[in-house]
Amino acid sequence: MTTIEGGMVCTNDEEFYEVIRMLRSHGMVREIRNDDVREKWKLKYPDLNQDFIFAYPAHNMRPTELNGVLGISQLHRLDSNNERRSFNLSRFLEHLDPRLYKTDFRVEGSSNYAFTLVLKHPSMEMRNKVEEILLQNKVEFRRGLSGGGNQLRQPYIKRLGKFPEPTSLTNTDYVHHFGWYIGNHPGLPEEKIYWLCKILNNVSSPYV
């Protein structure tokens, strides 16, 4: 049955229902309605960002005519938005404390849609402090950058065959545990960037 976007599946099987909910949204565990089942997944994979556990290989593709019209109407803003995102990112990296965070990324030609935040030193204590301060200040973030971090740690990958150990991807695994992205909107006021850097720079580190 068409519903303009996607369709509809009807079932009286609760387990199948929960799987379908995950499959309709990238296979993400957070789509499960049953609190007990969702908690079992989280306890099984404590090394993953709890909001980004992917149980199944799945997609979320929903282009419609309305989406197309809106997208085309935004094209005239593309260049100016990219310039602003590049400006925002440079200000963010310039004002972060390089003793605490990595700031020497290659950004030439980048119009990053997110601020890349990576700890300079591996520290679970520091990681928890950073996340606590972001949550306290209602700053949305995703640990491991986008998409749930090191994909070799995701449960869905085990369904697709045999892969190397997650720790074999050294840089990827480091970012999985000690990196985040924070949204970089072209309409973000410059003073908000300085404020964000200030609260991040004030997080105490065992290395400084």
Image (cartoon, rainbow, N blue to C red):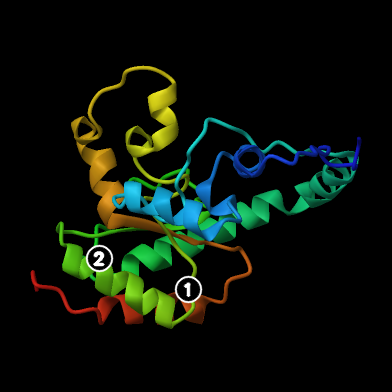
Q: Work out how far the residue at label 2 is from the one at label 1, CA to CA, in angstroms.
A: 15 Å
Disc 2: which residue: 127
Quick one: quadrant of the C terminus?
Answer: bottom left
Instruction: Name the spot of residue 115 as percent of width and height, x first.
Output: 43, 59
Residue projecting furthest to the top = 161
**SS category of the residue bearing label 2:** helix
What number is the disc on residue 179?
none
Q: Earlier in the sequence, mark 2 or mark 1?
A: 2
Residue projecting furthest to the front = 12
Q: Is residue 107 left or right of residue 98?
A: right
Quarter-of-image position of residue 141: bottom left
Disc 1: which residue: 139
Observer-nearest of 173 and 11:
11
Instruction: Name the spot of residue 18 as percent of width and height, x first.
Output: 61, 44
Q: Residue at x 63, y 69 (%)?
A: 187
Is 87 placed above or below 144 here? below
Q: Residue at x 25, y 65 (%)?
A: 127
The residue type indicated by label 2 comes to: Arg
Q: Residues within 10 Å of mark 1 (few under 14, many from 20)?
A: few
The residue type indicated by label 1 comes to: Val
Observer-nearest of 208 and 130:
130
Is 95 placed above or below 20 here? below
**SS category of the residue bearing label 1:** loop
Instruction: Name the spot of residue 126 as percent of width and height, x first.
Output: 20, 69
Is 98 placed above or below 200 here? above
Q: Is residue 100 something that shows in the picture?
A: no
